[in-house]
Amino acid sequence: MKLSEKAEEILEALWIAVEEKGRGYLELDRVGVEPDDPAYAELAALAFIEVKNGSVYFRQEGKAEGRQTVRRHRLAERLMMDVLNIRGEDGDRKACQFEHLLNEGVDTKICTMLNHPSTCPHGKQIPRGECCIEAERQGDIGVVPLTELKSNQEGEIAYIQTGDSKKMQKLMAMGVLPGNRILLMQSFPTYIFRVGFSEFAIDTQMAREIFVRR
């Protein structure tokens, strides 16, 4: 089920008011979506919300969807900061745009790639998903820096986390690209790894910026 962007914004604002601020409802003029927007009728038709006396209330069916909407938004914020290194107002704006693309299944992949973060960049809790519970049950630590691997351990490159464009270009020239396999051959005194048929040596700081899925 794909909701309109405005409908997701309503659910997000209402979930935060009800679940995090302890309120039973949210006044229409505080939602951030115009009171006459058709998104309210869209949600009411799905029995997610009820609008009465100038306020919007959750119906039981809507709470779970609101929770997922907040989860997608906060995962998008983490993605912007941790992977794409987009911060501040620009990062918040792009996260708002990107969250609507995290349909069912995509949010799970993003969460797993980010190693199941518990909070967004603003320190707010990210509602846990089934993937988080399953990873905890299996002891799966998800994505880790290359420095967490032991010699002769192999993994799949998930992403590079650096704001230095020269470093990024250097690593990409080595073949350090998402999806490629990487084998750590040595971790002291320098990190030596193999990608494909080529071997490279880097320092500890650069190794910390390569994130690998074991």
Image (cartoon, grey):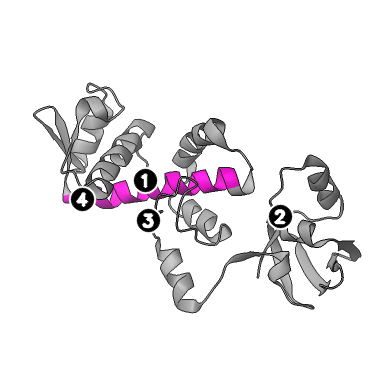
Estimate the x, y position of residue 127 in percent, counting from the top left. Answer: 37, 56
Along the viewing direction, whichever of 105 and 81 lies nearer the viewer: 81
Labelled disc at residue 178: 2
Q: Of label 1 and label 2, which has the lower sequence position?
A: 1
Quarter-wise, where is residue 52 in the image? top left
Read off the residue under disc 4. 61
In magenta segment, residue 185: no
Amino acid bearing label 2 = Pro
Q: Which residue is drawn at 53% across and 54% down?
A: 110
Q: Where is residue 58 in the image (x, y as percent from the top left)?
A: 18, 44
Amino acid beneath label 3? Pro
The crowding category of the residue bearing disc 3, from other C-alpha atoms within 10 Å (few below 14, some 14 to 19, many at least 20), is some
Name the amino acid, label 1: Thr
- 198 or 15: nearer the viewer: 15
Percent from the top left, x then y, of residue 182?
A: 78, 66
Q: Is residue 192 left or right of residue 11?
A: right
Judge by depth and name the residue closer to the eye, 174 or 204. Answer: 204
Range of magenta residues = 60-81
